[in-house]
Image: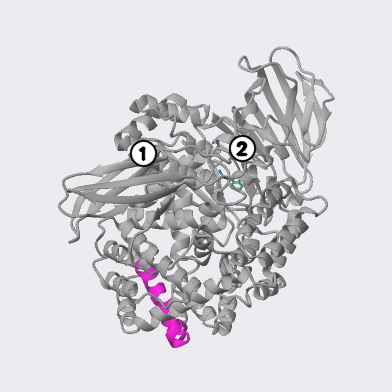
Amino acid sequence: PQTIYLKDYTPFGWTAEEVHLTFVLAPSATRVRSRIRFAPNPDAPKQAFFLHGEQLKPISFAIDGTPVTPEITDTGLTCAVPEGGFTWEAEVEIAPVENFALEGLYMSNGMYCTQCEAEGFRKITFYPDRPDVMSVFTVRVEGAEKVKLSNGNPQDSGEGWAEWHDPWPKPAYLFALVAGDLVNHPGSFTTMSGRDVELNLWVRPGDEGKCAFGMEALKKSMKWDEEVYGREYDLDIFNIVAVDDFNMGAMENKGLNIFNSSAVLASPETATDANFERIEAIIAHEYFHNWTGNRITCRDWFQLCLKEGLTVFRDAQFTSDMRGEEVKRISDVIDLRGRQFPEDQGPLSHPVRPESFQEINNFYTATVYEKGAEVIGMLKRLVGDEGYAKALDLYFERHDGDAATIEDWLKVFEEATGRDLTQFKRWYSQAGTPHVAVSEAFADGTYTLTLKQHTPPTPGQPEKLPQVIPVAVGLLSPNGDEVVPTTVLELTEAEQSFTFEGLSAKPVPSILRGFSAPVVLERESTKEERAFLLAHDTDSFNRWEANRDLARECLVSMITEGAEPDTAWLDGLEAVIRDSALDPAYRALMLGTPTQSELAQVLHQRGVTPDPDAIWTATEVLKKTRAERWSNLLPHLAEEAKVTEPYQPDAEQSGKRALGSAVLALTSRLDGGEAAKAQFASADNMTLQLSALACLVQAGAGEEALAKFRAQWNGDRLVMDKWFGLQVAASGPSETADRAKALTEDPDFDMKNPNRFRAVMGALAMNHAGFHRIDGAGYRLLADWLIKLDEKNPQTTARMCSAFQTWKRYDETRRGLMQAELERIAAKPGLSRDVTEMVTRLLS
Ligand code: HT7
Ligand code: ZN
């Protein structure tokens, strides 16, 4: 496959002034007619006229009304064109019903829908399918379906046809079309300038009862973007459509967002609190793209973080405002460490702005999205809230309508704040997680912190330069008072010292407050000091982090030295979870333990080969110990966690239920699942039902409940995904792979549906000890299915290959087994470009 480089960027030789498309829908023979007005692009070098196009059956082509015969290859066409402007016309035929890759125009449960990001439009018609070619689209859809939607505003319609016009120039990746016998949940919004916008959430008949929450989330997002960023919606209508077969969470097509049904449909009976929170965040994310992505788009796909990092940052701000900053920040850091750190520290490591790719779909990663958002968080911390607001205003004012770059983005910050961001820009070009080592000294009332930064080599980048790292620090006096409030130290050198004067005693430092930079902090501190921070830190993130550190240290000692659980730490933690002044959601997070893969990562960083079985055993022993030690406390906590009001998926109630679930998980280790059985029987919402079921399966007492659950929810695809996933996630290490295999033989397992495939195979990959079973059964099963799925859906297959991204850190046997599976995948004849690139990088 061909490698594409950022340095080779060249503008397209023509501008597309207007685009007219007509779709005559038919499942196996949809006709697509295009009429495009092209004009020479004065900013581009001379070049041959090339339009992308893949898997299209050509019917006819004309220029200015005269038939032409272009030269067509697998990737597109070239054609001789006139010197000046001209009108291009083409007709092609496509077969949506045979499209299982879910890119381009495809069918899901009898409904037509599209997915064009990143390069799916070229499977619809011949076009300059690149984000810097922006045009105004008018679309006519012909078909018998009741509902026919496209981008922009409705223009006209009649029996069997509908026309849409989008006045805002857009790249082809934001094109969308939906047609089907759908029903809508309507709503409306009045913008800050007083314009009325029609809102619709389109779903399959039967799903009407799962729309209300999504609609409210959309209205809240629209309001928030006006209030916080001054951004108003810009069309008369905003449509959202729920689709069952979808490769990712959702897609921000202009005026016509398309959502994986799991990312928008919810009712208290069928969705958990976590589902509701995710839905609210994804609706906000896609809506926020209207400005950060659509009105200002990316010049090329290397700039993906320009829209994704910023939009993730914005949706995190929104969730913090809706649900509480502390809990959101902790959850985001858990997620970053669980998904982005392993990526950054393994063979798939790449910069936030990659410099080359073979298949862009492989770069919709945690690094581009989540680390991209962290980089913006650091920028905001460095320039301050006011500087950030000024820079964003300038960004919107200057670049509205542009296809922009990271250089454009940083320039508005430089101009708005007067700050030189040359060194900061390394966050976009250097891959890998920086490590920051801390040492300290105290003499004559002066406390000195010395910080040293070092980033380990990553593929293609053996040497790293120092980055600008904002390290938020506070100092506590030995009696627990804060003597120096949070101060941001700017680490710019490889090694740098910072002093604090006038202290009466050696303080206890609280370092990297709020997780002020996405780094690994290396600090040798005593357990007593961490326990002190757990008890006294005024920074809620670092208070949680002190607990996490103690948990990690306790587990590492149990794994490597066979130590007993650290009872001093457990007493300190008990004091926190007993404190009913603290938010239940925060206490639930305090009760969480480091994941097994996080422990594997920590051991690997310390030069110890992780043993998944030993990690699993230590984690289990710790959970059991906690349950026994707190056996008197658990009933009180369970009582405190009870919600008596009718179900609401808000932060307050969800926090209580999260605490209740954590308590139930511990209780189940003492009572063999009795309390869980009672909760399962009486639950009137999915959060309580599912947490009880998980405890029962985990306790080995789940068969009856699983059967009941299936009988109750058989007709609900989204709930049945939970049924499939939970069994694999909650099973013990020796049975995970067998469970997963048996589920792939279930008549309701459908590999063509990405949600169902991920429910089973994703859960297998996430069950650390189960996936890494020493006989390689987990690896083999996953590889078998990846090989099968690649023939249908390369994008989802390639994403799931990352399950193998940490393969090099394990023992020789496991390493060998994983390598053999990767090589088996690589050797498959006809392997897709997506998967070829992934396995090549994994094996490098
Ligand atoms: N911008 C979108 C990214 C995306 C995508 C979405 C659905 C299916 C395939 C996709 N490929 C890329 C989603 C987002 O970040 O909002
Ligand atoms: Zn996005």
Q: Residue furthest top?
A: 83
In primary-sequence order, the first of circles 1 and 2 is 2
Residue at image point 65% right, 62% down? 757
Query: Helix or strand or loop: what does disc 2 sit on?
Result: helix
The circle on residue 166 is: none
Q: Which region is colored magenta?
A: 654-677
Main SS, magenta region, reads helix
Q: Secondary structure at mark 1?
A: helix
> Can you give x and y, in whole percent of width and height, for residue 708 in the image?
56, 81
- The residue closer to the viewer here, 140 or 595, is 595
Residue type at the position of mark 1: Lys
Name which residue lies at 53% across and 41% down: 352
Are the residues tagged 1 and 2 within 8 Å (C-beta)? Answer: no
Q: Is residue 697 visible?
A: yes
Q: Which residue is mark 1?
A: 380
511 with respect to 711 (left or right): left
Q: Residues within 10 Å of mark 1 (few under 14, many from 20)?
A: some
Instruction: Residue 695 in the image: state x and y as whole percent.
Output: 49, 78
Task: For residue 512, say whether it is visible.
Answer: no
The residue under the point 54% across, 85% down is 701
Give the Cα separation between the discs numbered 1 and 2.
Answer: 30 Å
Q: Which residue is mark 2?
A: 173
Q: What amino acid is at disc 2?
A: Tyr
User: Residue 43, relative to residue 514: is it above or below?
Assistant: above
Please provide percent x and percent y for residue 800.
Answer: 64, 56
User: Of 475 and 11, which appears nearest the observer?
Assistant: 475
